[in-house]
Image: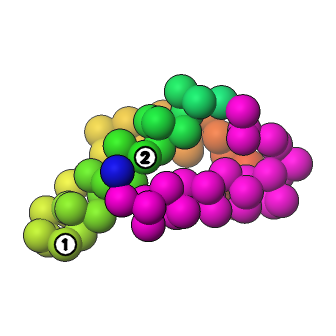
Amino acid sequence: MPSQIIEIVESLISNIKDDYDLDLSMDDELFMGLIFHVRALINRVKYQQLVESPILDMIKKQYTFIFK
């Protein structure tokens, strides 16, 4: 696993803690899921294979505080 992806995920989790006072640093399942997600995201951007998320509307409704 490239260290750059690990650094991105660590930074993301740290920013969530700072911005939302939500400490997710001990959630190993989330950490690994984010690593796979970010790696796939980077590949999609690199090869210009952008896709729309079929669950984006549900996420926006469930986590409205993030999208304010």
Q: Which mark is residue 30?
A: none
Q: Main secondary structure of the magenta part?
A: helix
Q: In the figure, 19 relative to 65: above or below?
A: below
The span from disc 2 to disc 1 (Cα, nearest Å) is 16 Å
Question: Circle 1 sits on which residue?
Answer: 46
Magenta residues span 2-26
Q: Quadrant of the C terminus?
A: bottom right
* Image quadrant in which you'd find residue 15: bottom right
**Residue drawn at (67%, 45%), measured in percent from left and top?**
64
Residue in the picture at 61% in, 55% down: 10
Q: Front-most of 57 and 8? A: 8
Q: Is residue 57 visible?
A: no
User: Which residue does the numbered mark 2 point to in the structure image?
Assistant: 35
Relative to 43, is 66 above or below?
Answer: above
> How dense is the environment of label 2, judged by Cα within 10 Å: few (below 14), some, or many (20 and up)?
many
Identify the amino acid type marked 1.
Lys
Within-10-Å neighbours for mark 1: few <14, some 14–19, many 20+: few
Q: Amino acid at mark 2?
A: Ile
* 10 inside magenta stretch: yes
Q: Is residue 39 left or right of residue 47?
A: right
Pick whichever, 36 or 58, lies toward us: 36
The tally of labels here is 2
Disc 1 secondary structure class = helix
SS type, badge 2? helix
